[in-house]
Image (spheres, rainbow, N blue to C red):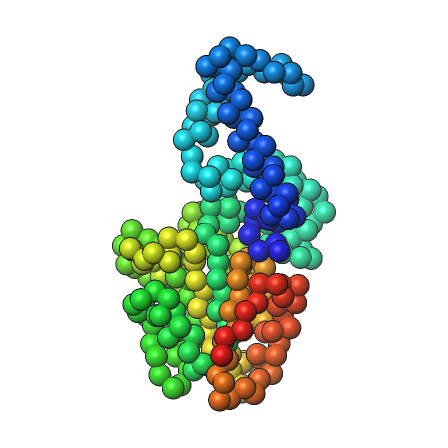
Amino acid sequence: GIGHPHSRILGWRSVSTACIAGMRVSLRRIFELKRHGISFPTKRRLSWFSLSSNEQSEAINDAKLEPKEFVAKHLSKIYFDKILPLEKAFQYDKFYTPSWTHGDFHAKPIILILGQYSVGKTTFIHHLLGRSYPGAHISPEPTTDKFVAIMEGNSEKTIPGNAAVLQEDKPFETLKLYGTSLLNRFECVEIPNSPILENVTIIDSPGVLSGEKQRLERGYDFSGLVKHWAERSERILLLFDAHKLDISDELKEAIQSLKGNEDKIRCIL
């Protein structure tokens, strides 16, 4: 999958794991040099004392990082130093997906939740969180009329879309490409002390509509945005009501936009 920037860089998680393991081994060997005064052959004959003060400081700081922080730091360096220049040279963002940002690398894995209106998406999220979230409403009629990113925060608050895309520590900067119509229908909700949000970010989507008039009132490319989120998600949950399994035209288009991300999809009745 290419949902998370870590796997976008190296292609397969198994390769990524092997590379990171190799980097961590290299760091351990550097510290062994300091402890035992032993060197080993490399292109640059490396010992602790041959490192500059900045390199020594960086090695010490790396050793203190959590594994996920270590991965994010070094893979983002590979991406911005080596891969991003190639993407820009070949205009990769023009015909496929926008380039990654620093916020993408330090973001938690994303779970995208899709389904027709009143199928139980918001109720399902309440069950996962063990509580409601600000701005959530439940009724038989369409209630969620915007994309809502639910993530961990120090305090409970709602951030408008126009402000959320400007925060570099969040993976939403590329949403600016979809214009103000989308940003007016997007918001970020931060919730403290939620065990599940310590590990993932949840995207609640607007209920998929059946009427052409309602679709036109959205003001943005819904299927295009679903594709955007799908490519950045680690898991896509498609919710269906077992008592009304008919699929609207818009839901059909949304499902078609998930092409290439089939391995991430799970259907829930």
> Of 222 and 243, which appears nearest the observer?
243
Question: In the rendering, at what x and y percent does residue 16 appear?
Answer: 60, 42
Task: Determine whether, in the image, residue 198 is placed left or right of residue 237.
Answer: left
Question: In the rendering, at what x and y percent does residue 37 appear?
Answer: 51, 10
Residue 186 in sight here: no
Q: Residue furthest front?
A: 36
Q: Residue furthest right?
A: 90
Question: In the rendering, at what x and y percent does residue 8 appear?
Answer: 62, 49
Q: How many marks?
A: 0
In the rendered image, which quarter is residue 96 located in?
A: bottom right
In the rendered image, which quarter is residue 129 located in?
A: bottom left
Question: In the rendering, at what x and y percent does residue 170 appear?
Answer: 44, 51
In the depicted structure, whether residue 104 falls above or below residue 222: above
- Residue at x 64% of width, y 48% of height: 12
- Residue at x 55% of width, y 29% of height: 25
In the depicted structure, whether residue 181 falls above or below residue 207: above
In the rendered image, which quarter is residue 147 located in?
A: bottom left
In the depicted structure, whether residue 5 falls above or below residue 135: above
> Of 162 and 97, which appears nearest the observer?
97
Locate the N terminus and report the quarter of the image it occupies.
Answer: bottom right
Task: Determine whether, in the image, residue 193 is placed left or right of residue 95.
Answer: left
- Residue at x 53% of width, y 59% of height: 233
Residue 72 in sight here: yes
- Residue at x 48% of width, y 69% of height: 113
